[in-house]
Amino acid sequence: MKTLSYILLYGVLATCGLASAEELTAPRGTSPQQVAYTNQHRELIDKWLQLTHGLVDAPARHFTRLERLTSDNLPPQQYRKSWYLLGRALYGRGEYEAAAVALARIGGRLPEDVRQDFTLLRAQVLMAQSDYERAAAVLGPLAGRRSGSPYAQYNLAVALLRAGHQSQAIDTLETLGSLPAGTVEAEALRDQANITLGYLYLERRKAKNAREALQRASLNGPYANHALLALGWVEWQARNPRLAQSAWTELLDGDPASPITQEALSGVPQALWRLESHTQARKKFDAAITAYQTQLSRLDDIIGVAREEAWLTMVLADASPDDLNARTVWQRMDHTALAPYLRALSEDPGLQQNLQHYLALLRLNNLTASPSRLQGAMAEHLGIVMSQPIDPGLERDLQRMRQQIPFHLARLRRNLREQALEVLARQRQQLRQYLVNAQYALARLLDELANKKS
């Protein structure tokens, strides 16, 4: 039977949305289990809530105390899994050094159900600390050859690339890019591998290899447009402007806020110019310039909206904290002025981490609204209830914690605003560069035509 410390440690994590509660959920039809409550368990709840929600500045300072609390009460496998979950939570918050310390505390063999995920997590922590050589060494045995995990293989290739081992990275990507896709996720990873290969071969001026890799990408997958854009550049480098123009033209009807569409807008007239279709090239340059100017004006309006901290509060209005996660927030934002740039915002790692932290704090605020709510969450997720009244000390701890939450929420809202503005500013800078390049190319084309007439 699980000890109370174990139940509370995992239960609070699960109820705050930081870990799965599947293995802890009580079987249907069973009555809640009565458990005793001690002062030690109050401290465990208090420390865990703080550690997993960033309410302390240096989580590592509390590791020794948390270790004593858990190792005194947990069997070795459960104890190690506790540290694994803590490391995962810290990695998700971007506290990579603290995550590395937590994972190093495990010191033994983990349960089978988390062993592979632990290896991936350890490698991700190393990569986040720019230790790519060690990350590649950790991922190597897990990636294996054709039987390896596709996710591990892709991460191994990234680690090898960043460590400067390009040839080994290409071999790994070739293995992954040639695998049959058994799931949607595996197909997406395979497509990413082939697109990465396409650009790597493009850098090496190996058009044939690049073309073969890109043609393996799915025509209906989420990365189909990325592959088509890259294929256009391969044909351009191979001096096949007609094929390049054909690939890029298919992208012109896409979302004008998409960097892929914006890049294709400048590529098509360049290819037409090389084909000496001057009239068509001039029209396409004019169309591209108009599109860039229109999108710049639209983007300036969107940046104005993003400067207001209230946008996040408006998005989350009338939503229950328990029903929110990053995916549902992006869905709710689909009806706001920020919608055209949701993809860019949702793919920014720093913004995504802070959003998840913000949502976890909202859930924590909801969970600690009263001791009875915390008890109710435990009973709902884990099928347990306290056999004694909530200790007054825990009630004071929860109240103190709630007093800190508004400050941290306000800080995270500011961070989210600044990060959103940084993402949009990068998009604006790229868009502005496309505009300047198109204007310059058009001017050169007009000069060339004028010289021919004279």
Image (cartoon, rainbow, N blue to C red):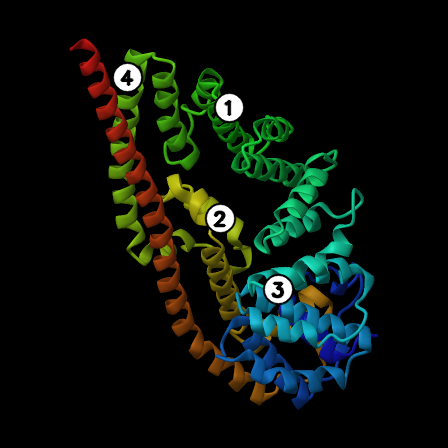
Q: Do the residues labelled 1 and 4 touch (CB within 8 Å)?
A: no
Q: How far apart are marks 2 and 1 (CA)?
A: 32 Å
Residue found at the far top of this picture = 453
- Does dot 1 land on a helix, a strand or a loop? loop
Residue placed under numbered mark 3 in the picture: 126
Q: Residue at x 26, y 44 (%)?
A: 300
Observer-side mark, 2 or 1, equals: 1
Task: Give the mark nearer the N terminus: 4 vs 2.
Answer: 4
Q: Name the residue under label 1.
A: 238
What crowding class fits label 4: few (fewer than 14 Cα within 10 Å), some (14-19), or many (20 or more)?
few
Which of marks 2 and 3 precedes in the sequence? 3
Disc 1 to disc 3, C-alpha distance: 39 Å
Q: Can residue 42 be seen in this view?
A: no
Q: What's the CA distance linking mark 3 and mark 2?
A: 21 Å
Identified by mark 4, the residue type is Lys
The residue that mark 2 highlights is 347
Callouts 1 and 3 close, C-beta under 8 Å: no
Left/right placement of residue 382 relative to residue 233 reads: right
Q: Which numbered disc flags the more N-terminal residue, 1 or 4?
A: 1
Q: In which quarter of the image is residue 36?
A: bottom right
Nearer the observer: mark 1 or 4; the answer is 1
Residue lying at 80% horizontally and 64% vertically, measured from the top left = 30
Quarter of image, res 2: bottom right
Which three-letter amino acid code belongs to the residue tagged 2?
A: Glu
**Residue 283, disc:** 4
Q: Quadrant of the N terminus?
A: bottom right
Mark 3 or mark 2, whichever is nearer to me = 3
Indicate which label's residue lies in the foreground, 4 or 2: 4
Q: Which amino acid does label 3 sit on?
A: Leu
Percent coordinates x, y for residue 203 in the rendering: 52, 38
